[in-house]
Amino acid sequence: MTVLAAAPDRKPANTWLGYAALLCVGALLYVLTTQYPADMPFWMPWEFSWPEFLATALTLAWFFLGLSRVSEKPPLWRSISFVLGAASLYIVLQTHIDYYAQHMFFVHRWAHFVLHHAGPFLIAMGVSGPVLYAGMPAFLRPVIDARPVRALMNFLQHPAIAPVLFVGLLYFWLIPSIHTIVMLDRTLYDIMNWTMALNGIMFWSLVLDPRPKPPARLSPLIRGLMILLIELPQMVLGAILSLSMTDYYPVYTICGRALDFSALSDMHYGGLIIWLPGTLTSFAAMIVVLVNMRLNEEREEHAQA
């Protein structure tokens, strides 16, 4: 996808009124969930988080503002993919699903599958970076373009670093001693969720970039190798947890399970979620890489004809 040319914003007052409206919605959610938690429906936040609310609300606001400002619109299916991906992250973090994720290991694994795989995968398929850039306030763009920020992103998305970080975070947060501490500390719990989501977005955006190299960072061969590098460790971890007869995560028993599952059944189902959906996501990514490679080859052939 080529970088889109942004048109100037002719209604700054309306834009800032929109931001004020988002803050009012957030304040209302905060008051309702803190003052009347027992009366909230399933789709309302279990524990309201300003950072998670603002990250989602501002991202979607900048996306739709960007759509109104760019001269060349992205395909509709890519826009839908992006919105669904962003919404999926919000759903697992800011609805009552989060409560069950804190009290059931297999729900926790489903939530992290969305945070690390499905949601970022959809966001990456949206290829909406230029649209977001056009929609964000002008004073933030120099921050995005700053050399230290670019250098950090180049390091984290280096082909030797990205797959290690992707699998490493998955393993790190599931080390039993660390997992127990994290699940009992709200701050660490939030850090875990943020790192999984941001790492997933960085990894899948790198791998699923539809452009050829250059301007894309990686060739299809390197992308395919990265997919294979993350697939086997996930399968091994999923197999260990789904076949083991030892409960590695007693914290869910200590805190009380929300559903009537035995400790081993809960862990076995969680292991299967790591094993099967994670593997299927890698297969889907490989297909996308191959399709993009073929489409780029066809475009090059037509250009030369």
Image: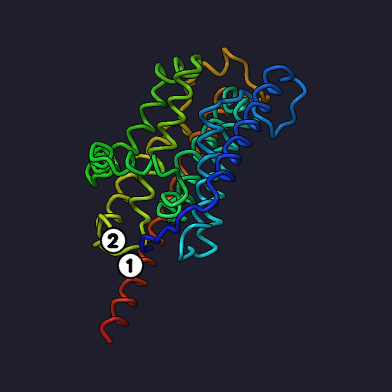
As displayed, is residue 157 above or below residue 216? above
What residue appears at the point 53 percent right and 46 percent down from the top-left corner? 12
Residue that label 1 marks:
293
Question: What x and y, as percent, mark residue 277?
Answer: 49, 46
Q: Which residue is most to the right?
A: 39
Left or right, 232 with reference to 83: left
Question: What x and y, as percent, mark residue 227?
Answer: 33, 50
Q: Can residue 277 be seen in the rendering of this structure? A: no
- Which of the numbered marks, if any, corresponds to residue 110? none
Crowding at dot 1, Cα within 10 Å, few <14 / some 14-19 / many 20+, comes out as some
Helix, strand or loop at disc 1?
Answer: helix
| Disc 1 residue type (three-letter) | Met
As displayed, is residue 241 above or below residue 258? below
Helix, strand or loop at disc 2?
Answer: helix
- Which of the numbered marks, if any, corresponds to residue 220? 2
Q: Earlier in the sequence, mark 2 or mark 1?
A: 2
What residue appears at the point 25 percent right and 60 percent down from the top-left corner? 219
**Quarter placement of the C terminus:** bottom left
Q: Can residue 122 be seen in the rendering of this structure? A: yes
| Disc 2 residue type (three-letter) | Pro
What residue appears at the point 59 percent right and 14 percent down from the top-left corner? 255
**Quarter placement of the N terminus:** bottom left
As displayed, is residue 58 above or below residue 128? above
Q: Are marks 2 and 1 in contact (CB under 8 Å)?
A: yes
Question: What x and y, as percent, mark residue 214?
Answer: 24, 62
